[in-house]
Each structure stands twice: as C-alpha cells, then as structure tokens.
Amino acid sequence: MENETTTGANTEKRFLWIWLLLIICVVSIMGLGYSLSATRHSVDSVQQRISTLESTADSTAHQLAQFRDSSKEEATEIASKLDAVTQRLGVTAGDLQKARQQFAQRIKQHQESVDNKLATELAAKASSTDVDAVRQEATSKLAEVQKDADAKLGNVSNDVTVVKGDLASARRDFARDLSDVKTTLNDGIARNAAELALLRKKGERDYLDLDIRRDPKTAFQRIGDIQISVTKTDPKRQKYSVVILADDNHLEKRDRTVNEPVQFMVGHDQLRYEMVINAVNKDRIQGYLSTPKDKVLSAERTTQVKR
C-alpha cells in the first residue's frame, strides 16, 4: 500500500511539472508574438517616416524647380522688355546688354549654389526621423532664395523704370522740338495776300501765284519750271489732291489741307520747292509756289557732298 501511495504522488508531481512547463511555453510564445508585433509596428513606423521624408524631399525639389523655371521666365521677360526699350531709345544698348548678362550670370550662380547646398543637406538628413525640422529648413531656404531673387529683379525693374523715364523725357524733348519746327514752318508761310507781300519784301525766296482749276481738257498747268494738275478738291473739309510734274517725275500729294506747306525736290541739284494753298473751292485751288532765289547756295545735293 505504501508503494502504491508513493507511486501516485510521484505521478501527480510529474503531471504538475508538465502543466507548469506548458504554461511557461505558452506565456513565452505569447511574449515572443507581442515582441514580433511591436517590432513590426516599429519597422512600419520607420518606413512611413522614411516615405514621408522622401515625399517632402521630392516636394521641396519640385518647388525649387518651379521657382528656378519661374525665375528664368521672369528674367527672359525682363530681357525682352529691355531689348524693346533699347531698340526704341537707340542708345545705351551696350550697357544694358552687359547689365543683363551680369544679372543672368549672378542668378545662375546663385541658383546652382542653392541647389547644391540644399541637395547636400537633404542627403545628410535623409536617415533622420526629424521630418518636420527638414521641412522647415527647406521652406526657409526656399523663402530666402525667393526673397533674394525678388530683390534682384526689383533692382532690374528700377533700372527699367529709369530707362522708361529717360524715354518719356526724350519724347517730351522731341515733341517740343517738333513744335518749334512747326512754329518755324508756320512763320515761313503766308496764309493770305498780305502775309505773302511781307514774305516777298524779305527777298529771301521767289514767290509765284497759283490759281489752278480742274480741267479735263488741260490736265496740267505750268507754274515756273514745274506743272501742276488738280485731281480732287473738298471745299467742306478744305482739302485737296494734286499731281506735280517735275523733271519727268510725277509726285502725287493726296488729301493736303489749306495753309499746309508741301515741299518737294526739283532738279539735279535738289532745290527745295514749297507749295502752299490758301483757298480750296470746287475744282479750284489758290495759293503760291515758293522757290529758292539763289540756285547755287540752295542746292542741297552740293551741300551734302561737301559734308
């Protein structure tokens, strides 16, 4: 009996140890599964951060490329505007070309420097998990580049504004000169018989009276050494059209107004003749023809050769 009791007790202890070992194995397997799950979660988190960093780097590079393209387009537009202003002014073309080349070179060098520096910093921080810091630094760099480019483009815009101001000033000067020329021309013409008499008293030129009618039978009427034919009259608007025959050349003058000096060259020596019509009636014009008194001194071809 004692042997059977001892054998039963040993069997119970053996089963107890087996159950303990099973429980320990189950707990170990569960712990290992939890560790594997946590490790996998950490790996997924790291991969997600790396993907976010790569996406941020691609976005930053794309923004930088867009800014570089925008800067090139703005520089091209400013260059074209400078070309247009230069062509209209006809001066300082060399200075503007040199300034434009220097500006383009500075922009190119600055962009290359920023590209290299930003690429180096992104590569060095590619393995870091601090994505927000990288994004903030990239945004700050891009803002600095934009600010610097805006400042340089602003300087060029100021230069263009100065050139535009010079152009406007030149236009005003030209308008004043043109007004002075018109005033001089108006002072040298006669609008009526009294003013024509005063011009004749000066004795600077010869003046021939004009009274030409539009006649289908006699197309041209001789005045001095030229011939004139009236082709159209408009009494209401005080305009007329004529054809001048000088040295076998037909010179057509269309829609000229009353008291408007009409100048043309005559002869081999290019003598300047001037016709002024003071009155326009139906199929009739009246005025005078002014010719040089001294043919030698007034020869413009000779003057040009001497120059």
Image (cartoon, rainbow, N blue to C red):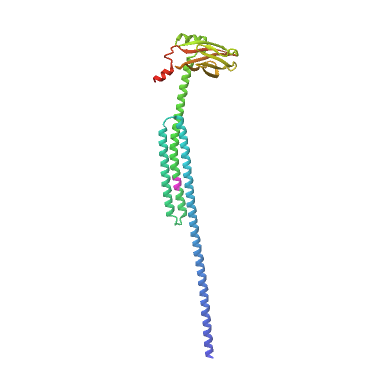
Q: Nearer the viewer, residue 290 or 214?
A: 214
Residue 98 screen position, x and y as percent: 40, 36
For the C terminus, which image quadrant? top left
Q: Which residues are magenta?
A: 140-144
Residue drawn where x is 50% and y is 66% of the image: 36
Residue drawn where x is 46% and y is 30% of the image: 88
Q: Nearer the viewer, residue 86 or 262?
A: 262
Q: Is residue 261 visible?
A: no
Q: Is residue 237 magenta?
A: no
Q: How many numbered discs? A: 0
Q: Is residue 222 above or below residue 103?
A: above
Q: Is residue 240 above or below residue 44?
A: above
Residue drawn where x is 45% and y is 27% of the image: 170
Residue lying at the far left in this picture: please name it: 306
User: Mainly helix, strand or loop, the magenta region?
Assistant: helix
Residue 296 screen position, x and y as percent: 42, 13
Residue lying at the far front in this picture: please name it: 248
Residue drawn where x is 46% and y is 24% of the image: 174
Q: Nearer the viewer, residue 172 or 83?
A: 83
Q: Is residue 29 above or below residue 70?
A: below
Residue 37 screen position, x and y as percent: 51, 65
Q: Is residue 87 above or below residue 278?
A: below
Q: Quadrant of residue 236?
A: top right
Residue 282 shown left or right of residue 158 in the figure? right
For the N terminus, which image quadrant? bottom right
Q: Is residue 150 visible?
A: yes
